[in-house]
Image (cartoon, rainbow, N blue to C red):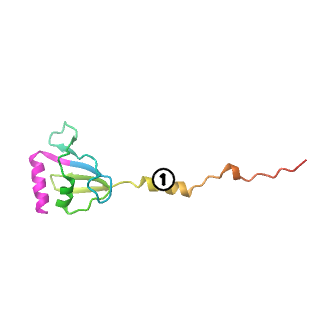
Amino acid sequence: MNPHSATLLRALATLRVTEIRFTITRDGDTEHHSIPRARTDDIRVAAQPFSILSLEDLFEAYAVTPRKGTYTLRVIDGRLDYEPMPPRKLARRATALGRSRPNPAFASRPDKVAA
């Protein structure tokens, strides 16, 4: 384990933080993220905003390049888990392009015969 990450984990353990979860919204940029939410030892309390955490320092300590997705830092075992964002926009665009509906203006109609 990197000495910087060990120091960070010790500091978080001192604050009784067990888990921190946040989302990066732009690849390679720690400036675009959701507010980190921390869980503590107290089970009754929901995750609290933990905005004092520097995500730039976190990624530097773990020597990881930030990618778009959700990260979970588990303080007990020091794991930084990554879940990629689902490709919703790409899937929607592909289905819209692949499935074409016939335009009623150009639908084939039987020719009218003049009476």
In the picture provided, is 105 more to the left or to the right than 33? right
- Does residue 17 belong to the magenta stretch? yes
Hey, which residue is sitting farthest front in the picture? Answer: 31
Q: Position of residue 88 (x, y in %)?
A: 43, 52
Please say if 52 is above or below 67. Answer: above
Q: Which residue is mark 1?
A: 92
Q: Position of residue 67 (x, y in %)?
A: 30, 59
Q: Amino acid at mark 1?
A: Arg
In the picture provided, is 103 more to the left or to the right than 23? right
Residue at image x 70%, y 53%? 106
Q: Classify residue 49 by image quadrant.
A: top left
Residue at image x 28%, y 47%? 34
- Does residue 52 belong to the magenta stretch? no
Q: Position of residue 72 (x, y in %)?
A: 24, 52
Please say if 49 is above or below 10. Answer: above
Residue at image x 26%, y 62%? 65
Please say if 93 is above or below 50. Answer: below
Q: Secondary structure at mark 1?
A: helix
Q: Residues within 10 Å of mark 1 (few under 14, many from 20)?
A: few
Magenta portion: prevailing SS class: helix
In the picture provided, is 24 more to the left or to the right than 111? left
Residue at image x 55%, y 58%? 98
Q: How many marks?
A: 1
Q: Nearer the viewer, residue 27 or 79?
A: 27
Q: Position of residue 9 (x, y in %)?
A: 13, 54
Q: Classify residue 45 by image quadrant.
A: top left
Q: Which residues are magenta?
A: 1-19
Q: Quadrant of the N terminus?
A: bottom left
Q: Nearer the viewer, residue 21 or 18?
A: 21
Q: Classify residue 82 by image quadrant.
A: bottom left
